[in-house]
Amino acid sequence: MSEHTDTQQPVEAREIMYREALNEALREELSANPSVFCMGVGIGQRGGSYKVTAGLLEEFGPKRVIDSPISEASFTGAGVGAAIAGMRPVVEILFVDFSLLVLDQIINQAAKYRFMTGGVGRVPMVLRTQGGVGNGLAAQHSQSLEAIYYHAPGLKLVMPSTPYDAKGLLKTAIRDEDPVVFIEHKLLYMTKGPVPEDDYMIDFGKADIKRAGSDVTLIAWSNMVPRSLTAAEKLASEGIDVEVIDPRTLVPLDKPTILDSVRKTEHVVIVQEAIRRGGVASDIASIIQAEAFDYLDAPIEICAGKNTPIPFNLQLESACVPQEADIIAAVRRAVGA
Amino acid sequence: MYSKQLLSELYRKLYAIRVFETQCIKLYRQGLIRGYFHPYLGEEAVAVGVCAALEESDYIVSTHRGHGHCIAWGAELKRMVAELLGRETGYCGGRGGSMHIADVTAGNVGANGIVGAGIPLGVGAALASHIRGDGKVTAIFFSDGACNNGVFAEAMNLAAIWSLPAILVLENNHYAVSTRVEDVCRTADMAERGVGYGVESHVVDGNDVLKVYDQARDAAAKCRAGAGPILIECKTYRDQGHHVNDPGDYMPKDVLAEYKARNPESICRKHMIDAGLGSDQVDGIEAEVDAELAEAVEFARNSAEPDVAEFLKEVESY
């Protein structure tokens, strides 16, 4: 059995890329359980557009690593049906933007199945996808759509920011009894980080404090985590000590870790790449004001994407999502610096 | 030839669906059943013929008009009525209701409130069997209306390219709610769409349970031999409008009368008489089902409603 852990990785772990960490998680779970299989467009022979599934077809064969036609709604639905029938599918949707084609199967079918069957049915399926801006991928390949899935009861929602988290959380997702939407970030695939070689998993609902600090609580996920950490180092040189919390799973959300930090720092910044309106940041802010209002020294700052489709032009693209300077400015506002 | 036992079993199911729906419509009129109720009356032979051709370990996938599929698959009437009444003892503890009734442990993946959505689910169950090599077949029930939803084409193609053990049971009752099939499909038989995807496709009289049964048996055997999927278009008709509150005035009276005269029970009864069964034996089956249904209604009416406080505790986990 693998050991559950929510602690930071050991110092001596080797460094691998985010995409390699995901690949290892898939390989280990495919090896460990014959019920696990992967399905998606171009995941087999091509190894996936971002190489996450590279080599899996050769190792596990075409029944376990299935190249599907571009029929997102139906192959996702087939994943849901296979999960109901006892399998553990890992379905890949190439871009989170394309997941809009499968909303019925995810929100009306997968998310509600256990509930509608009075708790008897199970959909142990993972929907792997990736979102966020890349470099000029424009309006239909750059979105951050986690709020849609956050809003649908019955789903779990995972957004890892490091190779270590990516591997441990994907393994947990595959073993979970409920449907999990697992959103990677296209700009993180090539990032490197320490990942131990031994088997490990990361519990859902356990935030990770990526940087301890005492002046302000900064909550961020996915690609906003490394950006916020860089911002935090710069702010440290100004004497502002930022605590960076990565919830890692938005559903379930680790409220205790967030609230403990808020009670300590009394200042909050929430950074989200997704557009501001109707976002997860707004909900986290509402939770904090409801449960820790008396501790807040200042209004909660939300540093989020602009309410717009993502433009093609790179300068315009950068203007739409929080950059390091935006994060630094938001922290300064929060602490009144 | 068909055994007396088989004919009796087929008739028992046909009759059970007939009286279950008729009785539950009464309960609906009394205000005991709420929400949407899409009766299967008139189409019983499709579910009964197909389910009789399958093994207990197989899977079925149902639709919003799903009571008949459940009963044909062997559901207990008491847990069926209880679910329609929203009681804790129902198949889904009152959480699902008519449009979401399922019996997962028995291989009934369930009804569906979204037209067409069950087709990919069924293809997924068949994919699971294909990967495991477990020899199971999945029968996917869907309507003529679902054939104009994109997932019909997509999912049938997936089943075709992967040679999945799936029987695509197209219940052509000639109406998508109130839209006539001939207004939304250019071909006389929707089964032609299967041919276009390289899927062996058949058209049968969906009111004759033996015709459906024979075609489904052949399809199941082919699926188990790796020659799936198979599409079977069953031509049938609703006895009434889309749901219990739809008068169905758009259905031509003469066509409706013709189909009602050819109702699945009377056709099956003729098969039984031809096979040498007496009317007393038919009456005996009906009396048994009537008694079971009366008990089922009693059971459901006496069952508790779900506990709200318990439910709110469950909800915390979301």
Image (cartoon, coloured by chain):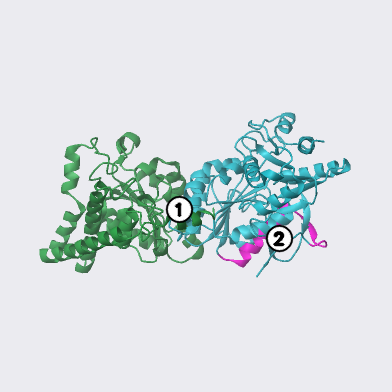
Disc 2 packing (10 Å; few <14; some 14–19; many ≥20): some
Snapshot quadrant of residue A216: top right
- Chain B rendering hue: green
Q: Which quarter shows the C terminus of chain A? A: top right
Instruction: Give the percent coordinates (x, y) of residue A89.
Output: 55, 57
Disc 1 target residue: B121
What chain does mark 2 sit on? Answer: A
- Chain A rendering hue: cyan
Instruction: Give the percent coordinates (x, y) of residue B268.
Output: 19, 58
Q: Amino acid at mark 2?
A: Asp
Above or below, A184 against A317 in this view is below
Residue nearest the viewer, comparing B268 with B200: B268
Disc 2 target residue: A6
Magenta region, residue range: A10-34
Instruction: Give the percent coordinates (x, y) of residue B257.
Output: 16, 43
Q: Amino acid at mark 1?
A: Leu
Residue found at x 25% / y 38%: B248
Above or below, B237 against B18 in this view is above
Q: Is residue A60 highlighted in magenta? A: no
Residue found at x 82% / y 46%: A241
Does the image show residue B278?
A: no
Q: Is residue A15 highlighted in magenta? A: yes
Judging from the image, what secondary structure is the residue with disc 2 in? loop
B277 on left or right of B195: left
Residue, far left: B279
